[in-house]
């Protein structure tokens, strides 16, 4: 008896299509979308014409002047999904200046 297992890893487009609103992901920029590599929060923007992805960086720079978010459509040139983050813990320290 023999068993054949065929595995095809998901494409970057497939990874993007599995994203849910509010997910955190490690992304890597592409030539078309030269975002800094790092952790981003993903928001899905649905409108009548296009479905856009809105990403917000969740790390300390380096950022280009006035760069604080990025909007794009899912296609072959989308930023590369490195890893989806399941749990995020944020701690805040406050102090008086």
Image: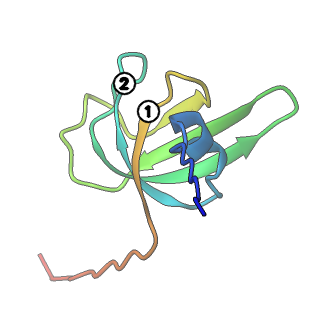
- Residue 24, relative to residue 30: is it above or below? below
**Residue hosting label 2:** 30
Q: Where is residue 36 drawn, in percent x and y?
A: 27, 36
Q: Secondary structure at mark 1?
A: loop
- Residue 64, relative to residue 54: is it above or below? above
- Residue 23, relative to residue 91: is it above or below? above
Which residue in the rendered view is the most extreme toward the front?
1
Which residue in the rendered view is the most extreme toward the right?
48
Residue visible at 27% across and 55% down? 59
Give whichever of discs 2 and 1 has the lower sequence position: 2
Location of the N terminus by quadrant is: bottom right
In this view, the residue in front, 71 or 97, is 71
**Residue hosting label 1:** 79
- Image quadrant in which you'd find residue 67: top left
Location of the C terminus by quadrant is: bottom left
Q: Secondary structure at mark 2?
A: loop
Residue visible at 58% across and 35% down? 13
Q: Where is residue 74 drawn, in percent x and y?
A: 62, 31
Query: Is 53 on the left or on the right of 93, as rendered?
Result: right
Q: Where is residue 5 drawn, in percent x and y?
A: 56, 53
Tag 2–tag 1 contact (CB < 8 Å): yes
């Amino acid at each position: 008896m023999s068993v054949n297992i065929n595995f095809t890893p998901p494409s970057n487009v497939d990874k993007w299509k599995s994203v849910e609103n509010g997910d955190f992901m490690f992304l890597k920029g592409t030539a078309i979308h030269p975002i800094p590599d790092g952790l981003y929060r993903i928001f899905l923007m649905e409108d009548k014409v296009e479905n856009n992805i809105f990403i917000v960086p969740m790390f300390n720079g380096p950022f280009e002047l006035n760069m604080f978010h990025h909007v794009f459509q899912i296609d072959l040139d989308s930023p590369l999904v490195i890893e989806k983050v399941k749990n995020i813990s944020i701690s805040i320290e406050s102090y008086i200046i």
